[in-house]
Amino acid sequence: MNARRAVGVVLLAALVAASVAGTAWAAEPSPAQKAAAARVHAQDIADLFREACLLQKANPDDVADWALNHGFVVGTQSGGEVAAALKQRGESGNVFSRSNKDESVLLIATANPSNCVVMGLSPVDGPRLRGRMEAMTGEWPGITVTAEPANSMDYDEDGPHRKISYIGVSGPDRYRLMVVSPVGTARGSVILGVSVEPRR
C-alpha cells in the first residue's frame, strides 16, 4: 500500500469515526470497564483481520464469500458512507458490517489492486492491537513478513496515532500490510490493512 493509498485509507477511517462519534454509551462505564472493552475490541479487530483478510490473501471475491458466509451484511449507514467515499475516489468494492445493528467493525474489500481492510469504530487498546498485528505477521502461513521502519510513523490526527507497515513475500507474490491505531487506548482511526502488490 503506497503512501497515497495509505493516507486515503486513514482518511476513510477518520470519516467513519466522525460519522459515529455521536454514539453514546447507554450508561457511563467505569474506567476498568472501558479498558476491558478496548482490549476486547482490539482482539476482535485482529481476529477478523486474520480470518477475513490474511487467510483469504486479500482476494476480494474470497473476502466477500467469507463475509457473507459469516453473516456480514452490506448497506448499513457507516458502510454506505465508506462505500460512497470509495466510489468518489474511483474505487470499487464491498463494505461489510456484522449486522444492521452492529457497526463497531467494518470489513472492506476492493479490487485493482486487491485490498482488504478492517476498520474499528470504537475505543481500542492501540498497543494490544499492534502486538496482535506483529504476532499475526509471524504466523501467516507460507508468507515471510518483515517490518518496514521507513514506512512507519507517528502522527497526530484527532489524537496521537501510530502507523506500522510490513511487507510480506511468498515466491513472486508481495503484500503490504499496515496497522494504524491510537498510540494508547482511545477512540480514533483504527485500521488493519493488506494490499496485494503487482508481481515483478
Image (cartoon, rainbow, N blue to C red):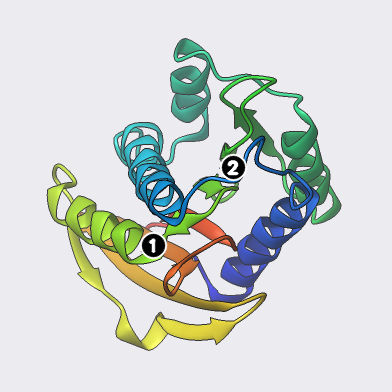
Q: Is residue 105 left or right of residue 84?
A: left
Q: Is residue 22 visible?
A: yes
Identify which residue is drawn at 33% across, 44% down.
43
Residue 60: % across, % down: 52, 34
- Label 2 secondary element: loop
Please rate how many residues cluster around mark 1, counting C-alpha atoms within 10 Å: few if below 14, some from 14 to 19, many from 20. Answer: many
Identify which residue is drawn at 62% across, 65% down.
10
- Asked if marks 2 and 1 touch (Cβ < 8 Å), the reply is no
Closer to the camera in the image, 120 or 138? 120
What residue is pinned by disc 1? 176
Kind of residue at disc 2: Ala
> Residue 98: which quarter of the image?
top right
In the rendered view, would you say 126 is above or below 123?
A: below
Image quarter where the C terminus lies is bottom left
Badge 2 or badge 1: first in the primary sequence: 2
Kind of residue at disc 1: Arg
Q: Is residue 172 visible?
A: no
Identify which residue is drawn at 40% across, 32% down.
52
> Residue 172: which quarter of the image?
bottom left
> Residue 40: which quarter of the image?
top left
Numbered disc total: 2
What residue is pinned by disc 2? 111
In the rendered view, would you say 28 is above or below 6?
A: above
Q: Is residue 128 left or right of residue 18?
A: left
- Label 1 secondary element: strand
Residue 11: % across, % down: 70, 65
Residue 119: % across, % down: 55, 48
Closer to the camera in the image, 17 or 51? 17
Identify which residue is drawn at 18% across, 55% down.
135
